[in-house]
Amino acid sequence: MGRLFIISNRLPVTLSVEGDKISATASSGGLATGLSSFYKDAGGLWFGWPGISFDDVDAETGRKIEELLINEHQCGAVKLTEEDLENYYYGFSNKTIWPLSHYFTNHTVFDNDLWKAYKRVNQKFCDTVVEEIGDDDVIWVNDYQLMLLPNMLRQKLPHASIGYFHHIPFPSFELFRLMPWRREILQGLLGADLIGFHTYDYVRHFLSSVRRILGYENILGTVSSGYRTTKVDAFPMGIDYEKFHKATKMPEVKHELDKIWQQVGDRKIVVSIDRQDYTKGIKDRLEAFHIFLHRYPEYKEKVSLIMVTVPSRSQVPSYADLKSEIDELVGKINGEHGTLGWMPIWYHFRSVPFPMLIALYSFADIALVTPLRDGMNLVAKEFIATRPTERDGDVGVLIISEMAGAEKELGEAVIVNPFDHDSVADSIARALRMPAEEQRRRIIPMQERLKRYDITKWAGDFLQTLEDIKSQQNRLYSKKLSGRLRQDMFERYGKSSKRLFLLDYDGSLKHLEDNPMQATPDDEVLEILSAITSDEKNELVIVSGRDRATLDEWFGNLQAGMIANHGAWLKHKGQEWEMLEPLDNEWMKNLRPIMQLYVDRTPGAELEEKEFSLVFHYRRAVPEMAHVRVSELKDDLRTMTTSLNLGILEGSKVIEIKNTNINKGNSGLRFINKAEWDFVMAVGDDWTDEDMFTVLPGNSYSIKVGLVPSTAKYHLNDVDAVRDFLKNLLGLKS
């Protein structure tokens, strides 16, 4: 593996330029904090925006910025202008993607000009980094501001290892479908080899959107888009556990603790630390604390809430409005409940330095982490890491929202619904009364878990999975029919005098249609097939699951053999149809009503009755409903066919039940054994064609359509690639 390139909207350092002086400070944010301790150790380079506008940066200053970043921080700058920031970052990223992903449709703006800016800046990121990347390097794209970048990089670097990690929630299909540019965004993400999310909920939502919007199915989280595959999985982001755990012993932290003690004394402390954002549930948290003070008056003057709200995205109007609402609510609660010697809420609207942050975590009895929706939330994990479990006594309690991604790993915490203010208020009281033994019983397992799966383990796990996926892909790519392999085949074809073509139709020569019953051959297909049959050295066999009448109607004018009904019937060139073996279709009378019932219960599904098989088509059905119905149908069919010689075939959006003796391999053998062929080629796209591949002679050319595992020797990307390949083989104009 070569170098590691991390790409994100922001660099882990923020620059400031004053005259000739350029300085850099560490950036805030979970991603910068999390990976800053990792990428340098991995010999990496980080590309992103360094925090300054490049509108007025002259060439000399730009050169100095680049030298500072690369020499001192192993970073490269993506040069964004004020217009870029306004429309791409504050615009589309944070007025469209962010609120929609967090289920705040009332804040979501759909503006085509903002979308154009988003595309333009993603392309700027691509153009900035692509010249620096070699074939052996690994690219790790991060977060929602760059959802188009993976596919942009893929177009420039088709063989690169590209991973993408999504650090915010991915919404359910019902919300994501509102996005006018949903297809482009999904296609942008699927340019990656590996897509990571914090939880399986987000994985499930993403795969559902891919299935319903793009029509791509997945097997165990691997999406096949025809010519390539993408793995989608969950990797819950960790923290630098040891850094936070050991920080409590820093002299600077002890100094901050002394200052807090002098002001607070022996009062109980509830701590709340967030970026200012409507997704964090700050107002709901204040309302819950207000209810707590009313419901449990015995805690007045004994408990204070220290609320730190870090300024964020102040240029976005909704964030400025939120600040005013929080200020007003804090004032109301303090005015109603405060006394001369006690203020219920200590409100700080500013960022805090690391020693003060650790001091707040350490001093707190309770951490109140109640976002309305959050991709992960590292504050909860950082609080857990600072707890002093090596000594007796209270160790603290974490109250966490069930809407936070971190909740999936922190099941021992007190889990609340942040919209249920009464329950949150009761949970605060419960936490204050919790015995020390129970506190330890909850905290210690969470600490052990976070210690094992820390930031280094998380990043290493993601990169190792990316390497594994790339290795699997390369094994498939090695079978791709291109370059020298293709030339060798062309040369052998030219020297051969007796050639056999076994060509599947649907999905191999013809794109699968929304209505499979209307997939009539077009002029290009007929031109290719006619060219094959016009050469007296060639014999063509069209292989299909369709019935005899359809094949005769479509291809009867060709001098070709045909296999119908997946092998139940075959027809040699110029002869009549013959049945492979005597078959009984009496079973269809019993199974037809069952399958028709499932069609009626699945809008968009159709039942096709063939001569010796029944086919349940569900390409036009709602995918989630179809998935449930197909599972139920297969269970019912297996139960009813256990004593019958019947098999259940799963194709592309079809379930077909037929006699087990019927398959394309047995029928194909009739043609293969007919003569001594010196050139045999078979092409197919689904698993029913695997039977055909397995019976071919050893020197044959078996070609699978789509980059998926197969017994075939070679792969072509899709129907268009098959057509182009055959036209080149036959000397036709492309």
Image (spheres, grey):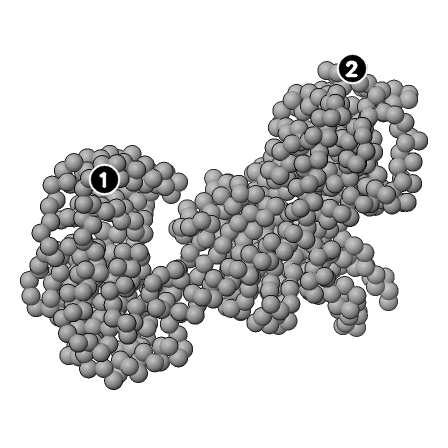
Amino acid carrying label 2: it is Pro
Residue 177 in picture, x, y percent from top left: 47, 44
In the picture shown, does residue 131 fall above or below 294? below
The quadrant the N terminus occupies is bottom right
Q: Of all residues shown, which one is farthest toward the bottom? A: 495
Number of residues whose C-alpha sits closer than 10 Å to that of mark 1, classed few (under 14), some (14–19) or many (20 or more): few
The residues tagged by marks 2 and 1 sit, at their Cα atoms, a distance apart of: 69 Å
Q: Which of marks 2 and 1 is nearer the N terminus?
A: 2
In the picture shown, does residue 344 fall above or below 23? above
In the image, taking residue 300 as reference, residue 181 lies left or right, namely left
Q: Taking the image as drawn, is residue 368 in sight?
A: no
In the image, taking residue 606 as reference, residue 101 lies left or right, namely right
Residue indicated by mark 2: 297
Q: Which residue is drawn at 55% across and 56% down?
A: 465
Residue indicated by mark 1: 642
Residue in front for this viewpoint, 295 or 427: 427
In the image, taking residue 156 as reference, residue 384 lies left or right, namely right
Q: Which residue is drawn at 61% across and 28% down?
A: 417
In the picture shown, does residue 620 fall above or below 496? above
Dot in front, 2 or 1: 1
